[in-house]
Amino acid sequence: MGLKTWLGLKQRRATTPPKSRIFFLHMPKTGGVSLSSALAEAYPYWAVLPDPCMCARNDGHYPPLDVVIDAMKFRPERIHYIWGHFHMSCAGLLGPDAKTVVALRDPVERMISYYRYWYQRQNLTLQSFEEKFRANGFKLSYDNEMCRRLAGTFDYSSSQDADQRLHAMFRSPISDPVKLLDEARRALDKCDFVGTMDTLPKLVSRLSMELERKIKLRHHNKSTAPDEIAAMVREHVERENKLDIALYEHARAIAAG
């Protein structure tokens, strides 16, 4: 979320936080900017991490996890809402009573959205995009990223090199795919609020009841990249994200329940 968007939210935010502490694990390219912005409106700006200054210093993006961990040490009792591209273990920053929220998206469509985003960000043409993709696939993010952000545990007790350690964890080879998928499914089962991109209104309704405040979903980060990108990358994406595809079916069953 950019600083301008945040300042706009500040004008209509609550002055006291809800009783519930929320950790929102924002899976990239799942509609998470819209959901995280909606949740932010339920909290005073001082009760949220990352705060707007952190994002502004990081070019409008989430700051490194190191920064969030250090900031939490200064005012742990004030923070009621943490959101970001982190790991589910990081919910522990808010204490054992924190409520966890995650929304997933069809993994193939999610990765296509990644490619569309970088097409726009790098001001490419279809020809230059195809050349970069054929050369190295852009080396975008991580395979099976949704599983990786849910499975296993991450040590957030120290901020030292936390962001570097987190990304190294996500880049590491998957030695046991069955175990990774099983751990991700079990983490999802323990999550307090699970949704999918196509069931976000239902998730927002449940969160409104939890926080006892009306949450209004708005659409951020709309893409204008050409549709031809999907055909170029689809086969590659399907091949590299089979665990996430299986995890998504589990998430759909939870969200429908």
Image: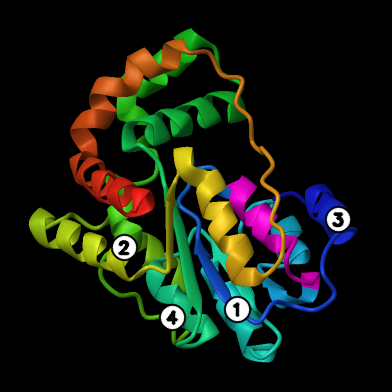
Task: Return the residue at label 3.
Answer: 7
Per the image, the residue denoted by label 4 is 156
Nearest the viewer among 203 and 247 is: 203
**Label 1 element class:** loop
First to last magenta residue range: 33-45
Q: Badge 2: how crowded within 10 Å, few (<14), some, or many (20+)?
A: many
The overriding secondary structure of the stretch rendered in magenta is helix
Residue 90 percent across, percent down from the top left:
45, 75
Quadrant showing the C terminus: bottom left
Q: Is residue 8 above or below residue 242?
A: below
Classed neighbour count for the residue bearing mark 3: other residues with Cα under 10 Å, few (<14), some (14–19), many (≥20): few
**Which circle's residue, 2 or 4, is located before the other in the chain?**
4
State the residue at coordinates (27%, 65%): 151
Q: Amino acid at mark 1?
A: Ser
Which numbered marker is on residue 20? 1
* Mark 1 vs 4: CB contact within 8 A: no
For the residues marked 2 and 4, what is the alpha-carbon distance in whole angstroms? 20 Å
Q: CA distance from mark 3 to mark 4?
A: 29 Å
Which residue is labeled 2 in the image? 188
State which tag comes first along the sequence, 2 or 3: 3
Label 4 environment density (alpha carbons within 10 Å; few <14, some 14–19, many ≥20)? many
Picture layout, residue 128 above or below residue 62: above
Of callouts 1 and 4, which one flags the residue occurring earlier in the amino acid sequence?
1
Query: Which numbered disc, 2 or 1, marks the residue that appears first in the sequence?
Result: 1
- Across and down, in percent, residue 249 comes to 25, 44
Give the quarter of the image for residue 164.
Answer: bottom left
- Quadrant location of residue 179? bottom left
